[in-house]
Image (cartoon, rainbow, N blue to C red):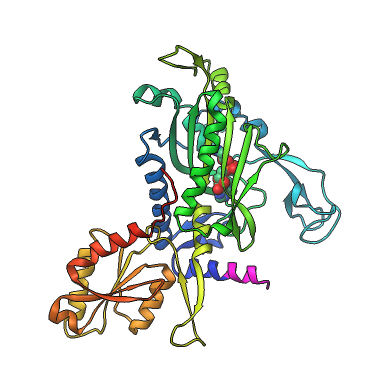
Amino acid sequence: MSKPDKVMNEIMSLAKRRGFVFQSSEIYGGINAIWDMGPLGVEMKNNIKRYWWYHMVQLRPDIEGLDAAILMHPRVWEASGHISEFTDPLVECRNCHRRFRADEIKNGKCPVCGSDDLTEPRMFNLMFKTFIGPVESEENTIYLRPETAQGIYVNFLNVLNTTRQKIPFGIAQIGKAFRNEISPGNFIFRSREFEQMEMQYFVHPDEADKWFEYWRQQRWNWYLSLGIDEGKLHWHEHGPDELAHYARAAYDIEFDFPFGRKELEGIHNRGDFDLSRHQQYSGKSLEYTDKVTGEKYIPFIIETSGGVDRAMLAILCDAYTVEPERNDPNRTRTVLKMHPRISPIKVGVFPLVKKDGMPEMAREIAQELRKKFTVFYDEKDSIGRRYRRQDEAGTPFCVTVDGQSLQDETVTIRERDTMVQVRVKITEIAPMIEKYIDSWERDKGIE
Ligand code: GAP
């Protein structure tokens, strides 16, 4: 097994073992490329979404939030071009009957069995179909959205008319998207059901290039502010043959996953493609009128489109560290060194031993801390093993109640990455953790 494969296997097994990610419907043998988030996974994913929403909506007077439905009018997907364009060329091997995207075929041979007996590529639409109402007919066909963006475009006027926004302004949403990928894989990197965090910024056409550069910088800085190693982040500019049907220009932010350098997020200049098409297909004017100059125009759209699951995988891969134990270099400790705001559990609380009133005091502290943080109370095994268990879950702090605590109402707090321990008053635990989390965020210039 190559080193990257080994690392990826270790991360996947940690994710399963610790309750980050489970295979969907596992007791039935699982279903390919569909995943469930376990107790730690759901906390981590929610933290990523909150962090994105905080920076992209809460801190920004020029961006509104939205939560549009997954199922939309079928005409939306005609207008958006997804019915005609959202296809991948599919090739089947006649020998082993595996199916591939045409670009995965190298030298005309099947990547699995090596046979050159392959079908001609045929276009395969990636949208999942279903029916609305009880009759399964052509006219009742609807689609599970393959991107959240269209829910924003069709609500452009609603948001404009119900807020005080003027161009330039944005609409952001987080939600599920579905793609019947031909070649899903690499754990949660490419799945058939996933979540997107998308923001569409509506601008004057003359200012599109300026805002495109602005959003590229903002989104890059956002990943840096998460503490992701800048050396593992890269830009990829789409060449003319790579651009999606709606895009005039596109850059991907890529991350060095153990399985290779892959896309984390796309920043696209979609021009007036989407609003013009929805205007044409719906028959409703989607023009914007500048109240000062009186100018009427269809706004251009700068889109930032990231995957929640991909961000989660990148953070897990970046954080995954196996290092020698300080006092015993022959042993290793596994630790997820992730941004404390993203960590699923913020504080582990332990009694040093299971007697002398320590568990009672520790439980009381844990319950008080739960009002502000996610807390895990643990009294099983040695204190060293309890620390290790929390290191592996990425928990930034462990609070231990010992003999002295009963005398003077102090506890020790241990920090995950440095393993430094300090003694503090019980009343200082929460402020200290909050201060530490704030100071951890590097100032990377995101607004
Ligand atoms: N609205 C534009 C759009 O959807 P995209 O490049 O196709 O653009 C945007 O997708 C992001 O969504 C990707 O950068 C990735 O993070 C995420 N994504 C796309 N397909 C995915 C899949 N099958 N599994 C997980 N995430 C996916």
- Nearest the viewer among 49 and 341 is 341
Q: For ligand 1, which image quadrant applies?
A: top right
For the N terminus, give its image quadrant.
bottom right
Q: Is residue 2 magenta?
A: yes
- Nearest the viewer among 188 and 307 is 307
Q: Is residue 61 magenta?
A: no
Span colored in magenta: 1-9
Task: Give left or right: position of 205 versus 328.
Answer: right
Q: Residue at x 33, y 69 (%)?
A: 397
Residue 257 image position (x, y, % from top left): 60, 60
- Nearest the viewer among 360 and 272 is 272
Residue 269 image position (x, y, % from top left): 58, 33
Residue 31 image position (x, y, % from top left): 57, 56
Task: Give left or right: position of 43 versus 353.
Answer: right
Q: Residue at x 43, y 60 (%)?
A: 41
Task: Give left or right: position of 334 versus 276.
Answer: left
Residue 419 image position (x, y, % from top left): 38, 76
Residue 307 appearing in the image: no
- Nearest the viewer among 338 and 7 is 338
Residue 159 appearing in the image: yes
